Image: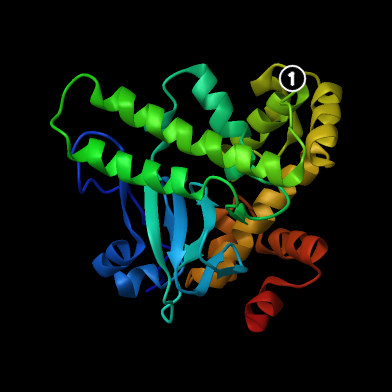
Amino acid sequence: MSSKLITYPFLFTVNKIQEINTTTIKERLSRKPHKLFQPHRTDFFQIYLFTDGVGIHTVDFEPIEVSPSHILFISKGQVHAFDPNETYDGKALIFTEEFFCRTDFDRKFLQSTLLFNNNFSQSYFKINNNFNKLNELFSEVLEELKYKSDNKKGDILHNLLYRLLLLSEREVDDQTGIKRKISTPDLLSFRFKQEVNIKFKNYKNTGFYTKLLNVSLRSLQLATSSTFNKTPKEIINDRILLEAKRMLAYDELSVKQIAYDLGFQETTNFNKFFKLKSGLTPTEFKRKL
């Protein structure tokens, strides 16, 4: 019987109401070690602050060499796996989109921050200036989660998470020497990419998204070219290709089943698409893994 890549839902452990949680990496791994060492998805966002040891953490085919004083951001839906031979430890924090996005401003921030939306590489970097502050924030989140429930708890946790994200963004700004200002075309590009991420299996035509976003094709093309240096169609195709690679690598499904799941009516059309975009047929890609 075929099996699909597992997507883990948010788990309430410390607090049974707020969709934010924090623990140590060792403690997180102790719960489902045999499962977390296998590639899997989550329907929540994750932040890992590494304090000790070394190892490999794989995110969407990219092996990341873990070192102390580094931080890793994993977006909802990304495929990742812990290293069964790891010696690393640190702090882990998870939260849902629903918890963070209380206002339109929150949603725009989450959709645009490069911590979770870096189009060029996984967001993993060394903390040079704010390590102690960030470490303390993880501890403050845990303390607040354990505190008795009242009408302030959600706001305090939300504020602590915002501070953690903003301090991380400041660290990136300090290291690169560039303060990136989010423009109107950027916001359009990020929203387009967010919609593609949700709807790409059923809607592969750029025209669908221009109607959904109520913009002209030209405006969308200029926006994505400015933000990502790609056309809207290239972004749609990239998302389809990434999902195809994930399923070919980690799902025990036939090529025909994967093609159907991705919205291709004919397997031959999927094969042609995959070969055109990756240089390999789906079967050749699976053999290389």
Residue 5 figure quarter: bottom left
Q: Is residue 202 visible?
A: no
Residue visible at 44% across and 26% down? 101
Is residue 92 shown left or right of residue 17?
A: right
Q: Please, is residue 102 above or below residue 147 in the view?
A: above
Residue 225 is situated, as x and y percent measured from the top left of the image, at: 85, 35
Residue visible at 41% across and 45% down? 44
Residue visible at 79% across and 45% down? 234
Residue 163 is situated, as x and y percent measured from the top left of the image, at: 47, 32
Instruction: Say which of 10 and 135 sits in front.
Output: 135
Is residue 90 shown left or right of residue 150?
A: right
Residue at numbered disc 1: 184
Q: Quadrant of the C terminus?
A: bottom right
Residue furthest out toward the left: 148
Is residue 224 shown left or right of residue 84?
A: right
Tag 1: amino acid: Thr
Q: Quadrant of the N terminus?
A: bottom left
Residue 168 is situated, as x and y percent measured from the top left of the image, at: 56, 42
Instruction: Say which of 238 and 153 sits in front.
Output: 153
